[in-house]
């Protein structure tokens, strides 16, 4: 069993679905599913009209509570101290991005945003465009990070970007 059970009304980060609200906890009425197994019914906040059912003891998908407001504020204030990802092998760049995004860890998401922002600036100065992989992964990382912070800080997702911009060195674009 994970660290703790989540309750109805909790907001949690659930893998690539991002922030979800726990709508119910209990057995689900589904053929072939044992009636004594507990499931969370989750409503992803940023994916319209969808529900996710997952066993309470699911170990395969990252499931954790969203940051508290205080944690989120402290996190944003610490963004300047987070380093970019060291990517030594260009051929493995996209693999590294994917692995990093899948952690659903806000620190790792900032690292990927910093890494790609730095590359964007460098490529621009060389007159090159962003690569498709860079565009894809910076978008996923920003959506994931801002999605969680929006709930923790009780803001709109777009407001989060401005909030971060006012508190962080300007070398981090959160687009």
Image: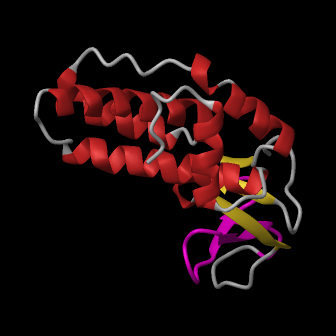
Q: Residue furthest left?
A: 127
Image vertical order of residue 18 relative to residue 81, above or below: below
Q: Is residue 62 visible?
A: no
Does residue 52 belong to the magenta stretch? yes
Q: Residue at x 75, y 67 (%)?
A: 21
Residue 27 screen position, x and y as percent:
80, 75
Q: Is residue 153 left or right of residue 163?
A: right
- Residue situated in front as seen by the camera: 36 or 102: 102
Residue 170 screen position, x and y as percent:
49, 30
- In this figure, what is the number of numbered marks? 0
- Residue situated in front as seen by the camera: 136 or 42: 136
Q: Is residue 55 left or right of residue 127?
A: right
Q: Which residues are magenta?
A: 35-58
Does residue 39 belong to the magenta stretch? yes
Image vertical order of residue 103 relative to residue 86, above or below: below
Q: Residue at x 52, y 36 (%)?
A: 109
Residue 137 screen position, x and y as percent:
36, 45
Can you tell which quarter of the image residue 2 is in? top right
């Amino acid at each position: 069993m994970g660290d703790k059970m989540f309750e109805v009304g909790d907001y949690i980060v659930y893998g690539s679905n991002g922030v979800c609200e726990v709508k119910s906890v209990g057995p689900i009425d589904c053929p072939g599913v044992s009636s004594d197994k507990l499931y969370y019914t989750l409503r992803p906040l940023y994916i319209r009209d969808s529900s996710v059912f997952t066993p309470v003891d699911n170990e395969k998908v990252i499931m954790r509570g969203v940051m508290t407001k205080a944690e989120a504020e402290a996190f944003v204030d610490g963004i300047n101290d987070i380093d970019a990802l060291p990517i030594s092998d260009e051929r493995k760049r996209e693999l590294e991005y994917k692995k990093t995004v899948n952690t659903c860890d806000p620190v790792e998401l900032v690292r990927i945003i910093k890494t790609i922002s730095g590359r964007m600036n460098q490529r621009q100065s060389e007159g090159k465009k962003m690569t498709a992989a860079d565009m894809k992964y910076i978008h996923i990382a920003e959506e994931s990070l801002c999605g969680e912070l929006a709930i923790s800080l009780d803001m709109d997702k777009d407001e989060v970007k401005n909030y971060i911009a006012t508190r962080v060195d300007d070398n981090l674009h959160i687009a």
